[in-house]
Amino acid sequence: MPEHIAPKKLYYFVFGSLLILTLLTWQIAYIDLGRWNTVVALIIAITKASLVAAFFMHLRWSASVVRLVLFAALFWLAIMVTLTVGDFFTRNVVSNPQAWQASQASVQVTQPVAASPRR
Amino acid sequence: MHNTQAVIAEQFDDSTQQHEAASLGMWIFLGTEIMFFGAVFTAYTVYRNLYTTAFEEGSHLLNAPIGAFNTAVLICSSLTMALAVHAAQTGKRKRLITFLISTMILGGVFLYVKFILEWLHEYRDGLAPGLHFTYAGPQAAHVAMFFCFYFILTGIHATHMIVGEGIMAILLVMAWRGRFSEANHNHIEMFGLYWHFIDIVWIFLFPLLYLLGAHF
């Protein structure tokens, strides 16, 4: 398989799209969209990164094994992000149910002798 | 110079196999780079969600137009790098040298803006945690956290660019001596992958650092 030489026109087209998307993400940032600011910014960033990877980095014409390496790296990145974020933002979510707390209190009041050996 | 004939290392059958092996190796390296930057981005995600308003406050202190300008500079340098690879693939030595020099100049502009117009400015304004941090406010400690991420992320990104400039200087000398041709241009192409990867990192850094607090 001889390597693919992309036409220069395509490079200029990708370059133009990247500049337009940069202008877009920059100007949208001045509008308050609440949580959606980040979502829009990330969607534009992922689009730009995909354009660079597909055309400037020739991924569009690369061997499948090369693409596999990229997807493996992104997959492992997703594992790292998911588990870390999942850990951090669920640490304080579960509190003791009130009923359980009440039963603990009554155990301590009514059966102090039975409760103490467990310590 | 016998550079019209492909130089094939002993372990490869032909130039196609050599080219694919080089691409695969380079992409595996870029995979490790994704994990390297990914770890800092993950930490950023956690802290940004813990101290959302403080991060927006910190981001507001950065200069978004300068960040946008630098993004454009880096995209231009990616274009000149892609054209340099194209020139190498088609065996145009002069064009290759021209585009390598343009890429180096654009990279230099980026680094100048980053260090002189931004870092130095932020240091003087008292926004450098640990060195000179005078920002006062109810959330000052968490704003300092934002600036830690700012300096670490832009710092490791700039380090990659400085390394890239060094490699480009070597490639420029090699191109000058006529080491590259239609048959031999793997070095240029693999370096191109590295340079575009740095561009992609910045594509994510720009909105995450500069645009976070632009809306108020």
Image (cartoon, coloured by chain):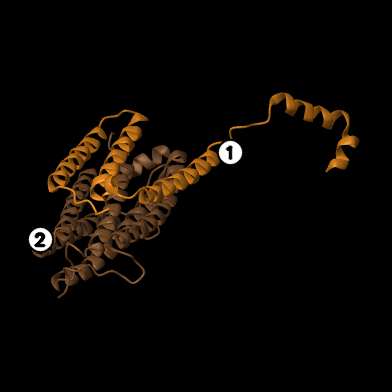
Colour given to chain B in the rendered image: brown
- Which chain is assigned orange? A
Q: Do labels 2 and 1 touch, CB within 8 Å?
A: no
Q: Which-is-in-front pick, marks 2 and 1?
A: 2
Quadrant of the image occupied by residue A17 = top left
Q: Mark 1 lies on which chain?
A: A
Look at the numbered disc 2 and give the secondary structure of its residue. helix
A95 left or right of B72? Answer: right
Are marks 2 and 1 in one subunit?
Answer: no
Residue on which disc 2 sits: B95
- Residue at 37% across / 47% down in the picture? B136
- Residue at 14% across / 45% down in the picture? A12
- Residue at 34% across / 44% down in the picture? B58
Where in the figure is residue A43, as x and y percent of width and height?
Answer: 32, 35
- Residue at 29% across / 44% down in the picture? A49
B78 left or right of B95? Answer: right
Residue A91 badge: 1
Residue kind at label 2, given as amino acid type: Arg
